[in-house]
Image (spheres, helix red, strand yellow):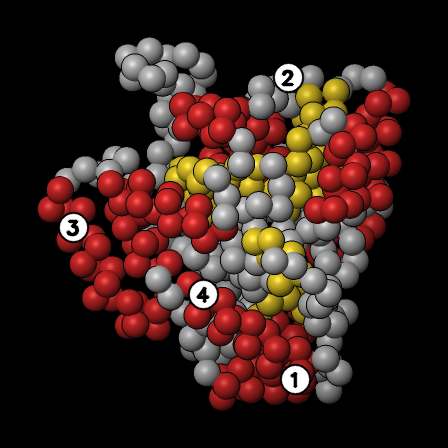
Amino acid sequence: MKPPTLPVADLPFVDLPFVDLKAQQRRLGGRIRARIDAVLGHRQFILGPEVTELEAALARFTGAAHAIGVSSGTDALLIALMAEGIGAGAAVFMPAFGFAATAEVALALGAEPVFVDVEPQSFNIDAQDLERRIGAVLTAGRLTPAAVIAVDLFGLPADYAALDDVARRHRLLVLADAAQSFGGRIGEVPVGRLAPVTATSFYPSKPLGCYGDGGAIFTGDDDRAARMRSIRVHGQGADPSDIVRLGVNGRLDTLQAAILLAKLEVFAEELAAREALAALYDQGLKDVVTTPARIPGRQCAWAVYSILTDRRDQVRQALAGEGIPSMTYYRRPLHLQPAFERYGEGPGSLPISEGLCARILSLPMHPYMDRDTAGRIIDAVARALK
């Protein structure tokens, strides 16, 4: 989920960061510079040793057999679908409430997105509606159901048990879009092992972010991993001069891997700090707005903290008047976006997603926010709704 261009021209000046990368840099600046200097020294800027080191560290963190560094979260999704041979005539199911990348990758391969509504509490794809949409596709007979992209929105893992049940019956690949949820878990199982294939993003605003674009794919399947490693380097075979399949230029830069290695050292502490901030927000806002769902057994990575209120735009204006930024993820569901509306069924077809777009508001969330700043934000939201 890349932040859109902020529509701040009509809002007063804001003085708090939405995501405070400067605070993180003050803590990690020396480690990051040392890592960058090492890359500048050996000058292996493409698939250098830091990429291999990062992949091993990510595999240890998740327990996945394979972690494959790639150029972005979007390319992670694309490469994962390419490795399954998904293309023309395939239906790829995905939630309508989310970022455009899920629809983009399906269309880029000649497949078609099929938009599914979301659960009103978790904001994640609704397995029951997924079942209905699969049935409609089978009845129409034009497309073959091939995959479901389960987006862990705002950092909360989707209901993979329910999705796996649907997927097994219809022989669908479950691809976890963990662009926002890396660091989350269900029970003792971390994101990266909740689905046969998981794609994540290291965009700077993510829980684990680099200083540019970057991503990774996780799988426990040796053959899948081999295909994905080949695809990310133009489809090369064991001999790089042999092109054995259609591929892309999807490599993770060594410099970005170096930065991620430094950040991964404190990632567990940052996740704990995000959880502590979310708990403060929960306590302070529970009687004022609808706060994010707490689903037993699921640990959110808190990439974004989003509230629901019928007076969303009023609250946003009031916060900006007090120097506090906010974001609206998302103002329009995918099936109503001009680029994708031909693949949807128009207004009213996915009521939960459409309703969320009118009420959602995201507050500043990062692991370096102090309690006083959190209290300032909580009090400002409460004042705005008096």
User: Residue 223: horizontal and vertical position, in percent?
Assistant: 50, 24
Numbered label attached to residue 38: 3
Quarter location, residue 33: bottom left
Q: Which residue is mark 1?
A: 284
Residue for point 72% across, 50% down: 159
Left/right of residue 170 with respect to residue 30 in the rendered view: right
Q: Secondary structure at mark 3?
A: helix
Q: Which residue is mark 4?
A: 268
Q: Which of 327 and 102 lies nearest the eye of the viewer?
A: 102
Q: Which of 306 and 187 lies nearest the eye of the viewer?
A: 187
**Depth-wise, is mark 3 or mark 4 nearer the camera?**
4
Label 3 sits on what residue type? Ala
| Position of the C terminus by quadrant | bottom right
Q: Are marks 3 and 4 in contact (CB under 8 Å)?
A: no
Q: Is residue 260 visible?
A: yes
For label 4, count other residues whose C-alpha is less than 10 Å away and answer few (under 14), some (14-19) or many (20+): few
Residue for point 66% across, 31% down: 173
**Depth-wise, is mark 3 or mark 2 nearer the camera?**
3
User: Residue 226: horizontal and vertical position, in percent?
Assistant: 44, 25
Q: CA distance from mark 1 to mark 3?
A: 45 Å
Q: Are marks 1 and 4 in contact (CB under 8 Å)?
A: no
Q: Which residue is mark 2?
A: 88
Q: Earlier in the sequence, mark 3 or mark 2?
A: 3
**Depth-wise, is mark 1 or mark 3 nearer the camera?**
3
Q: Secondary structure at mark 2?
A: loop
Q: CA distance from mark 2 to mark 1?
A: 50 Å
Label 1 sits on what residue type? Gly
Q: Earlier in the sequence, mark 3 or mark 4?
A: 3
User: Residue 66: horizontal and vertical position, in percent?
Assistant: 46, 38
Residue for point 24% across, 41% down: 49
User: Residue 58: horizontal and vertical position, in percent?
Assistant: 42, 48
